[in-house]
Amino acid sequence: MKASKIEINGENRIKVEFPYNQVLASLLKQIPGAKWSTAIKAWHISYSKAAFDQLKKLFPEIEYPNKVSEVKAEKAISAPSVPEIVQPNSQRKDVSVEVIGRSIILKLPKNQLDIHFIKTLRYSRWDGKQFSWVVPNYPGNLDLIKEYFNLRIKNLLVHEVFDVKTSADSQRKIKANQLLIIKTVAGRLKLIFGFNKELSYHIKTMPFNSWDSNNKWWSIPYSEKFLNEIKTKALAQGLEIVYEEEVIRKEDKVKRISRFDIPNYRNCPDEYLRKLQELRYTKKTIKVYLCMFEEFINYYNTHDIIKIGDNLIIAFLQYLVIDRKVSPSYQNQSINAIKFYYERVMGGQRKFYFLDRPLKSFNLANVLNLDEISKTISLVKNIKHKAIIMITYGGGLRLSEVINLKIKDIDSKRMQIFVRQAKGRKDRYTLLSKKVVPVLREYYKEYKPKEWLFEGIKGIQYSESSVYTIVTKAFDRAGITKKASTHTLRHCFATHLLENGTDIRYIQMLMGHASIKTTEIYTHMTTKGFDKIENPLDGLEI
C-alpha cells in the first residue's frame, strides 16, 4: 500500500494505492471524505493532518514520501474520531484452519476486521454450536485465507478423509478425491463429493436434478445413461469413483413427516381450508386433505408453495410409494389433495401428472359367521355396549354413522333407522332389527340420552375411538381370532343378507353404495352354494 500527494480539481488530496482488496477498501471508507476516482483508478482522502493520522493508524505499514508526512497542523480540519482497529498482522492472535470436505472451519479470537474479511467470502456463516466460522471450500478460498491471516495461522489441517452423511441416520468416510454414487431404493442416484465446479455444472444440465442443501449432495434420476455420463465426467476430473446400492428392509419403512421433525413446520394455507368448507366437504375429508397437503408442502419446506412444479410433485408421489410404501388409496388421496390446491384454490388448469395412478388392491374382508356374531353379542354385559354392537351389525352402519345417530333417527313403528348425511353427504334408510328394540329401550331407561343416541359423560357425543374399543374388546372376549373391527360388522350384515337371498339392489340401497359394483364385492365373500359344488379331487381314485 502506498500514499502520495495529488491535485484533483484544484484541491490537494492524498492518493492511496493498493491492489484490490474489499477489506482494505471498507477500512478506508471509515476516513471522512474518502472517495474513489475512476479517472486515476485509486482512492483519495483529504489533505489534512487529521485524515493523514487516521490513515497511518489504520494502515501502519503504508509507504509514503516525506512531503506527505509533513502535512502542516494549520491545514488540519476537524474530523470525527474513529475507534482503533487492529491491523491483522499488527497483533499476533492464533488462528486455526481445518479443511473438511466441502467446508473450511476457522477458529479465531473475535476481531471485527477479521469478521469483515470472512464475510466477504461467499456463503460463509457462523456456527454457534462449534463456535467457529464455516467457509465453503470453493477454489481459491483457502488461498485467500492463507494470504490474509499469513503468520497468524498456527494450525492448518487438511483432511484427506472425511465423514459424509449418506442417509438420515448413517455416515461414512470418503476421500477428498472420491465421488460416492449411491443408487437409492427411490430410483435416484445420490452424488456425494467435494467441491468440483465442472462436475457440478454438468449435473445441473441433467433433467430433474436436485441439490440437498442440508446434506450437501446432488441427486438425479437413475438410468444407465446418466450413470455412465457421471462416471465419464468424474474420471476426466481425476476423481475416484465409489458405487453402492441402497438396500432397505421391509421393517425400515419411512415414517410420515411429522411437525416435530421440521423446525419451521408450515401449516396448510387458510385459503385451502376455506375452499374446502365453501364446497361443503365433510369434516373427515377436510381433515384428511389438510393432513396430506401439509405433508406435501413440508416435504419441500424451503420452496414457495406456488412455485412447486410438476417434476417435484411427481418426485414426492414416488417418495410416497417407494420410500414410505403407502397404500394405493393413500396415494390417490394425496394426489387429490395436491390437485385440489393447484386446480380449485389457485384456479389453475386441470393437470395430469405423468405417474400412473395405482389400481386398488382387491382384498376380501374377513367375515364372521352367524355363530361368531351371536357369541360376541351374548357375552357383552354392559347394555350400552350391547346396543352399539347390535345396531351396528343390524343396520350395516359405518363407525361414523353409529356415533352420529340421534334419538329421533330410530323409527320403531316402521322398523327403520334414518342415516343422515352419511358418506358422500347422502341420507338413507336402513333396517332396524326387532331384537335390538328392547335392548335400546332398556338402555334408554338406564342412561337417559338427551340428543345423541349414544352419549358419553355429560351428554357429549360418543367418540369413534370409544366405539372401536368396545367392539374390539367384545371380539377378544368371544375368542375371535380373525382380524376384525367395527367395519367387519358392516361387511357381515351385507354378506349375510346376500346369503339369505336378498336382492343385491336392496343391499346396495341399505348400504348406501353409489355404485352396484361396490356391492358386488360381497358376492365374492359369500359361501352360499359351496356345499352343492363337488370338488374334483373327491372324485379321484386315490
Image (cartoon, rainbow, N blue to C red):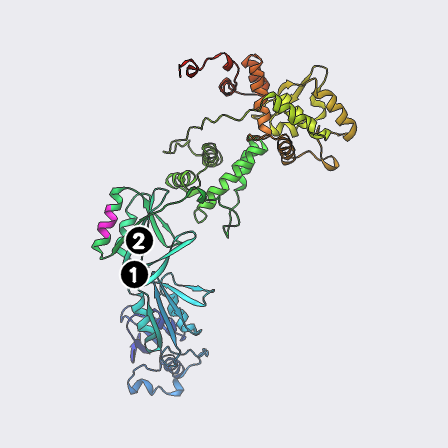
496 or 227: nearer the eye? 496
224 magenta-colored: no
Residue drawn where x is 37% and y is 40% of the image: 311
Q: Which residues are magenta?
A: 228-233
Q: Is residue 482 left or right of residue 188?
A: right
The kind of secondary structure the magenta stretch mainly shows is helix
In which quadrant of the rendered image does the N terminus lie? bottom left
Question: Percent x, y for residue 113?
Answer: 40, 73
Residue receiving disc 2: 180
Q: Quadrant of residue 442?
A: top right
Question: Percent x, y for residue 179?
Answer: 29, 54
In which quadrant of the rendered image does the C terminus lie? top left
Q: Is residue 506 left or right of residue 350?
A: right
The amino acid on which the numbered mark 1 sits, given as a three-letter code, is: Ala
Residue receiving disc 1: 176
336 or 49: nearer the eye? 336
Q: Which mark is residue 487?
A: none
Vertically, is 344 above or below 267? above
Q: Is residue 152 left or right of residue 429?
A: left
**Is residue 163 at all visible to an observer of this figure?**
yes
Q: Quadrant of residue 111?
A: bottom left
Q: Extreme front residue here? A: 542
393 or 462: nearer the eye? 393
Residue drawn where x is 35% and y is 45% of the image: 184
Q: Secondary structure at mark 1?
A: loop
